Amino acid sequence: MAPKNIFICYRRDDAAGYSRSIFDRVNARFPGRVFMDVTGITPGSDYSRVIQDTVGTCHALLAIIGKSWLTMVDDSHRRRLDLADDYVRHEIATALRRNIAVIPVLVRGAQMPSTAELPPDLAPLSLREAVEITDTDFDHDVQRLIYAIERQFGEVRLPPPPVAPRGRNNCLIFGIIGALVVGAIVVVLFLLGLLAASTNQGSVRPSDPVYQPSASNPAPTNGPPASSGIDFNPVGRWMVTFEQNGVPNNLEVVLLEDKTFQSRERNGNWEYDEREQTLRLSGGLTITIERQVNNVFVGHVEVDDDSFPVRLRRLGDAD
């Protein structure tokens, strides 16, 4: 499937600085797939033609709306949005006619314009769900915007950051966001697990963790038979495996005895319900263990009302 592209529509006199910062963050998540005039037009190119062709082939348009976006006028004191040749009006109207994802992005305290305040060809914009970007919670707000794009493209990697009340201590807010981000990465990497588990049940690959036989758990002779029961002790180092769009991913997570966990991305808390065989990680991640194959635990994970297959593989001290 061809990658989906994003177009950023803005007015330089209204929100150039915000648009540049948003471009940097969104392009980091979707590298090479974000178009903004200052980066996408080479010297000598026909500006209007490049804009028209790019809007006509993009899959999502971000309409950056600042305080002056609705009321800005030209040298003749005519409102720019009312002009047929206004490039912002043309870009958004083209995207609306194509019925692609058009996401209003409110910056500098701007309010969403009503249908009556917009030209007829932009009126549907007032019905689109907007994302507000603020100075105090810029990182958090941009993550919500990226999540909205991921949902539109079917490329979700992270759960949505929670909408925290304004005015709270920024350190606390960023700590919560960090916990959610790590939990989400754990989920994403867990998704590769089920496919890998189903293909690896017949044999143990050399790259798998070294199996340590014991009297209660003898070494397999013809491949690892499924265990009749589940003996899951969460404390230890785990490799979480999942697959997304055919791409395998792995994430190493350490579950500590004090009910906290660590990974390269973030730290958080965990809780295990032995009766229901569910492992809960802070950030809204719930893993249900369904069966055991030696030191591999197979099940599913629930996040954002979706369920995905996962595999947990215990790592020895030498891994």
Image: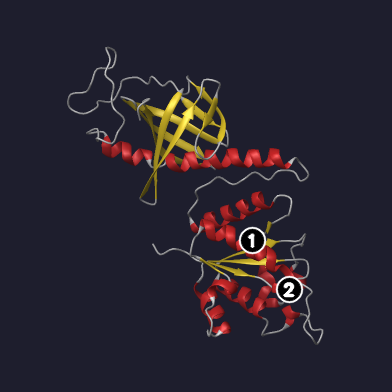
Look at label 1 and name its amino acid: Ser
* Residue, disc 1: 21
Left or right of residue 313: residue 265: right
Residue positioned most to the left: 222
Question: Is residue 54 something that shows in the picture?
Answer: yes
- Residue 82 point in image, percent of width and height: 74, 81
Mark 2 residue element: helix
* Quadrant placement of the N terminus: bottom left
Residue lying at 59% horizontally and 47% vertically, measured from the top left = 160
The numbered mark at residue 13 is 2
Residue lying at 72% horizontally and 42% vertically, measured from the top left = 170
Which of disc 1 and disc 2 is earlier in sequence? 2
Question: Is residue 126 something that shows in the picture?
Answer: no
The quarter of the picture where residue 71 lies is bottom right
Q: Is residue 304 above or below residue 146?
A: above
- Residue 43 point in image, percent of width and height: 54, 82
Residue positioned most to the top: 215
Residue positioned most to the right: 77
* Quadrant placement of the C terminus: top left
Residue lying at 43% horizontally and 28% vertically, measured from the top left = 237
Left or right of residue 16: residue 217: left
Q: Is residue 317 above or below residue 169?
A: above
Residue lying at 74% horizontally and 70% vertically, measured from the top left = 14
Disc 1 crowd rating (10 Å Cα; few below 14, some 14-19, many 20+) is few
